[in-house]
Image: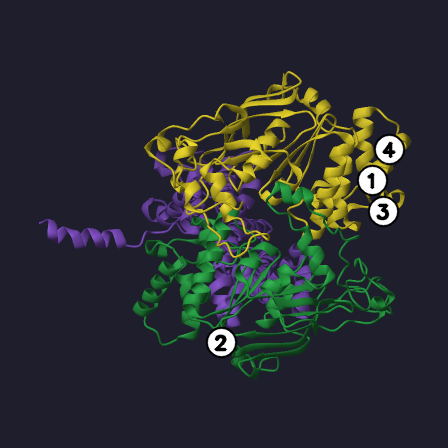
Amino acid sequence: MSLLKVDHLAVEFQTPDAAVRAVNGVSFELEEGSTLGIVGESGSGKSQSVLAMLGLLARNGRASGTALYQGENLLTMPPKALNRIRGNRLSMIFQDPMTSLNPYLTIERQMTEVLELHKSMTRRAAKKRAIGMLEAVRIPEAAHRIDQYPHELSGGMRQRVMIAMALLCEPQVLFADEPTTALDVTVQAQILQLLRNLQHDFGTAIVLITHDLGVVAGLCEKVMVMYGGRVMEHCSAADLFARPSHPYTIGLLRALPRLDEEGAALRGIPGNPPNMAHPPAGCPFQERCVDANAQCAERMPALDPLNGDATWLRACHRPVEQMKSLHEEPSHV
Amino acid sequence: MSEQTILSVRDVQVHFKVKAKSRLPWAPPRTLKAVDGVSFDLRAGETLGVVGESGCGKSTLSRAILNLIPATQGEIVWMGETLSTASPRAWHDVRRDIQMIFQDPLASLDPRMTVGQIIAEPLREHRRGMSKEETTQRVRAMMAKVGLREQMINRYAHEFSGGQCQRIGIARALVVEPKLVVCDEPVSALDVSIQAQIVNLLKSLQAEMGLALIFIAHDLAVVKHISDRVMVMYLGHVMELAGKDALYAGPRHPYTRALLSAVPVPDPAVERAKVVQILSGDIPSPIDPPSGCVFHTRCPIAQPRCATEVPSLRAVSDHAAAACHFA
Amino acid sequence: MKASLAPLLQKAADAPLEGRSPWQDARLRFMRNKAAVVSLLMLAVITLACIAGPMLLPNQFDSADWNAMSAGPTFAGWHLFGTDETGRDLLVRCLIGGRVSLMIGALATLTSVTLGIVWGAIAGFVGGRVDNAMMRIVDMMYAIPYLLIAILMVTLLGREFYLVVLTITVFSWMDMARVVRGQTLAIRSKEYVEAARAIGVSTGGIIVRHVVPNLLGIVAIYTTVTVPGVILTESVLSFLGLGVQEPMTSWGVLIQDGVGVMETAPWILLFPAGLLSVTLYCINFVGDGLRDALDPKDR
């Protein structure tokens, strides 16, 4: 049963120089309790898609399309209704915990606010619940820490607080926008393990937005690869890493430096990220794509099932069998 | 890669005075020990990768090597000449041979200068006699070498993408044909597909020009692709210094082991089967570093001895040295 | 024919493309701001009128027209702004007064901006105790009640033209000093300055090649902020009778004259006051336009 059904989501920003189409037609479904990784580089539109769904776009942004949550379109919901859902059924954590936490309020105040608002709890009951949650995210001396201010905690701990805050109301979906990018590698490992455990314990669906394919491999069952505001490939993580079928995915995996590979040379993708102020008419990847042909510049390929498998979607004009990218160098397997 | 050692760093320390905890005049002043005794040698044409997490001092070390932040103690010997006590005049001449590439590609370029002027600046500084035509010619040649179109010579930095800006930075560093280039996280701010381009560019230029590189990064996988030897730092100290193969195949220091196991691998099967060595706690502050071995507060194999005795960096095999009592 | 074209075409293809400097970007953005552009034109018109007007108009600023004393604005005798109680043509007096006000404004701005830049740049670049001392002096200047001191200075030193400029300068340089110091500090810690040091550029070279060009933006903005203050200060001093001496006049003096006969001959107040107001508004809009055009946050 799908929790979230997104169809042709598009986001446009009005800037004095030009209208920027950050997201140009994204569609996906999210099942209950599943983990989806949204992967992309800069300009791919991965963050903006999620921000649009939660009504967190900047003032000059407009979202179109549909994002159905329990049958209702999040994009056209009145703010009051959206507020009841946000933080409650759908919650989000961000990249930089220092700027996402209010430096002037104690941790306790910020957490109890969520519970008082959505669960109508008293302050005392909310504090107890909050301490319990801080313990669940493995913050030592939770009862003492809860009265501290964000700047008194380290980066890793602040991120745990964010996660605790996001899970207070036991949401159905947790959106995580680059939650570990700003953290050191050893702290990242801690946070990822925490997310895995929490997902197992609470059954929350997680949507993880990141540029780090390694993180996705460890946490997500399904992966959606975005480029230039569109979805390029959407399949299970196992399939994506073992048998990538899209030229961009293949290029991305080949460009990744890996610890487990011996002596393989890095292959960059030639060219530069797209300019979203003037999006190309056809496929946004075509000017960097080895497999591009004339059709690619004119028409955006549809996101179609690969070989009839509805769980493996791919947007490419070039059929898999004819792809040059696949044969240039053996993939990592 | 020749056997000639071009750079010798001996027990370099960079300490900063920080405000005391309380405002009272008799409160003892505190020191931030960004770099606390780092030693290594570098040979001509070699690439030394320097990795570590926040607070390890790798960036400060790079600034100390170039005297942008003077070392408070220790020696830096370049081509046999002790630089740490050198005059500004001597440093000026050395700067022709030691150049730097920065982390933020756009911020390291003056927004009011054209690309041509940016790349020509080292030439203006170190080759005073060069004519305008020759300078322009060299700049164009350098631009072609790093993969920039020569017609862009009059464009401004903000008109380029991140990867192209980093190419400009590389061109600027290499136009005077230095012997050593210190790269401070040169690809951290770039997309993955662009990272690979820049890493490959650096490697090919290194081979072509016989450069030695000090490559600082927090991404262990990138460092693996470009380094001959790798130095792992933690809280201003060197934990391990080993040949690339030795380090990645068989790390001797517990911190290196934890670091390597924490790096996510883009392979779901590997990731799920992996047992990550989770280090307890957070990285301590360099203002009040732990006594003895600075890593002992988080080390899985710490013993009482580790809190009192500082382990020295000693050879544990032909290709590796580790600073651990139990390596 | 084709053979000779080829090298030409090749040359054209190889020719360097012109870049869009931050200045050109700023100019484009400025031109898009209609209020700023209109204000700039208005200022140009006013300045031109003040310079050329008195030479073209038949009336003199100090000659009395006995046929039209305290006359309202009329087309007869070219008294488009009317005349004052002694029959002097107000239009010409306004324009002559404009010359003085604008000239004092320009001169005092020039001196105070120069002083402010030098002060702020030294403080920002040297840093440490010197910076501290210099900024405390700025703070002290802010604390001094300028009007009292201005009255004192004028009373002691006299009312020569250059002394008025000096008095105004003494109290108008602090904003620029503070702002330049702040910007210098910001630039000093930028990565491209660090890069220049890594290349081996001397401190002098860094100041000339990197700091100054990046200061110009903020200097331009704050110059346009200083000008209205300076003109207003001059007007206030003149209004109090401490400005330029008779028979020279400025807008402040004219306003002073007008206040006395506000009820019977309101135009004597309204026209110079109106000109002063319009000029100040226009300078403010131009300043706003510059600030938006040069705003680094947009990048």
Q: Position of residue A235 (x, y in %)?
A: 56, 31
Q: Residues within 10 Å of mark 3 (few under 14, many from 20)?
A: few
Q: Residues within 10 Å of mark 2 (few under 14, many from 20)?
A: few
**How far, Cα to Cα, is label 2 from label 1?**
56 Å
Q: Amino acid at mark 3?
A: Pro
Which image quarter: residue A89? top right
Q: Amino acid at mark 1?
A: Leu
Q: Is residue B2 visible?
A: yes
**How far, Cα to Cα, is label 4 from label 3?**
16 Å
Looking at the image, which is closer to me, B95 or A259? A259
**How far, Cα to Cα, is label 2 from label 3?**
52 Å
Q: Amino acid at mark 4?
A: Arg
* Chain letter for the part of the structure drawn in purple: C
The image's mark for residue A134 is 1
The image's mark for residue A140 is 3
Residue that carries the numbered disc 2 in the rendered image: B2
Residue that carries the numbered disc 4 in the rendered image: A129
- Relative side of A310 to B164, left or right: right
Q: Residue at x 55, y 66 (%)?
A: B228
Tint applied to chain A in the drawing = yellow
* Chain letter for the part of the structure drawn in green: B
| CB contact under 8 Å: marks 4 and 3 | no
Q: Amino acid at mark 2?
A: Ser
Q: Position of residue B96 (x, y in %)?
A: 47, 74
